[in-house]
Amino acid sequence: MTASEPTPPIASPSPAAPLASQLAANPCSHPSFDQFVATIAALRAPDGCPWDRTQTHQSIAHNMIEEAYEAVDAIEAADVAHLREELGDVLLQVVLQSQIASDAGEFDINDVCADVNEKMVRRHPHVFGEAQAANAGDVLDLWERVKMAEKGAADEAADGAGERREGLLDGVPTSFPALMQAQKISRKAAAAGFEWDSLDGVWEKVREEIAELQEAYAVAPKAANGKVDAAAEAAVAAVEDELGDVLFSLVNVGRRMGVDAEGALRSTCRKFRDRWAWMEQAAWQQGRTIEDLSSEERETLWNEAKKRERS
């Protein structure tokens, strides 16, 4: 089924999930959302706001990224009040982009909602159809199978129209952060059968890539501080290439373990920041800075910060 085809009617409530079907069949009214859409339309009207009227898809694209990151920060800080505000800012970007499209005769917010609703119904056949999913892992596998089926239908449509097929990885935005991009690429490739037989095979790949990184670094010319000589462009490129392979293989380890690599690294960054802040505070209380401390003193404070987390 392609995105342009209508979604089949939602199946009658099954004994296992009557509430889900009842909720889907009886949507609630959201007057505040309708009012918000009307407000944005008014801002874009000829006699509306001069700034809003001049915006384009491209001119405010960066705002979408910024607001999404701020919403994630609120989530990770467990700041519910701030999350409510940031989700509103994300919604603003969605509605404003949709209104810009509507003004250009491209699509409107109703089309956006209808499309994503169809997608969610289509990709949850275990809720709205006859498929079975016993746990979250089964759901993710089912999701990928449905997406592959969608791509197959899109390929057939492209062939019939004499158009170029969309490659499996064409839908992965190159604007994604590298770690997130690696996760999505590896997940799509695995869904197409490009996968190791076991986690042991992935670990073997990690060891292979680490050895190649060490080899590339060993033969590279180096500055006095041990860094690869920046003037040796080919050597720098070789080490970067091998380091990228190590990171990509570790992303696959996380995927096979069911661990989100992006979330894991964000958690580690947050943990490091918390420990560093504690170390700084401890140093300041002594009338000193981190830079003033000896290596042994810094190590002692670091270990104390770690113990503080476990207490």
Image (cartoon, rainbow, N blue to C red):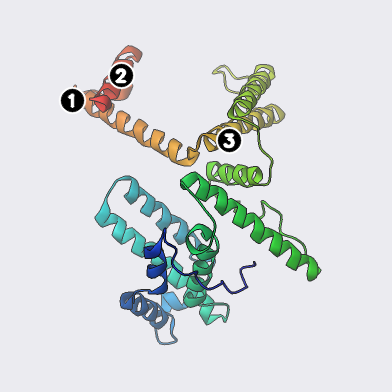
Q: Position of residue 167 (x, y in %)?
A: 71, 54
**Which quadrant is home to the N terminus?**
bottom right
Few, some or many residues within 10 Å of mark 3 (<14, 14–19, 20+): many
Q: Position of residue 193 (x, y in %)?
A: 68, 43
The kind of residue tagged 3 is Asn
Where disc 3 sits, the SS reads: helix
Where disc 1 sits, the SS reads: helix
**Rendered position, 154 above or below 31:** above
Q: Which mark is residue 57?
A: none
| Residue found 36% across the figure and 36% down from its top | 270
The answer to the question of whether label 3 and label 1 lie on touching residues, with beta carbons closer than 8 A, is no
Sequence-wise, the earlier of marks 2 and 1 is 1
The answer to the question of whether label 3 and label 2 lie on touching residues, with beta carbons closer than 8 A, is no
Where disc 2 sits, the SS reads: helix
The residue where tag 3 is placed is: 252
- Dividing the picture into quadrants, the one containing residue 244 is top right
Report whether 134 appears left or right of 256: left
Front of the two marks 2 and 1: 2
The residue where tag 1 is placed is: 285
Sequence-wise, the earlier of marks 3 and 1 is 3
Quote the CA–CA distance across marks 2 and 1. Answer: 17 Å
Sequence-wise, the earlier of marks 3 and 2 is 3
Quote the CA–CA distance across marks 3 and 2. Answer: 31 Å
Few, some or many residues within 10 Å of mark 1 (<14, 14–19, 20+): few
**Rendered position, 117 above or below 294:** below
Q: Is residue 293 visible?
A: no
Quote the CA–CA distance across marks 3 and 1. Answer: 44 Å
Q: Which mark is residue 303?
A: 2
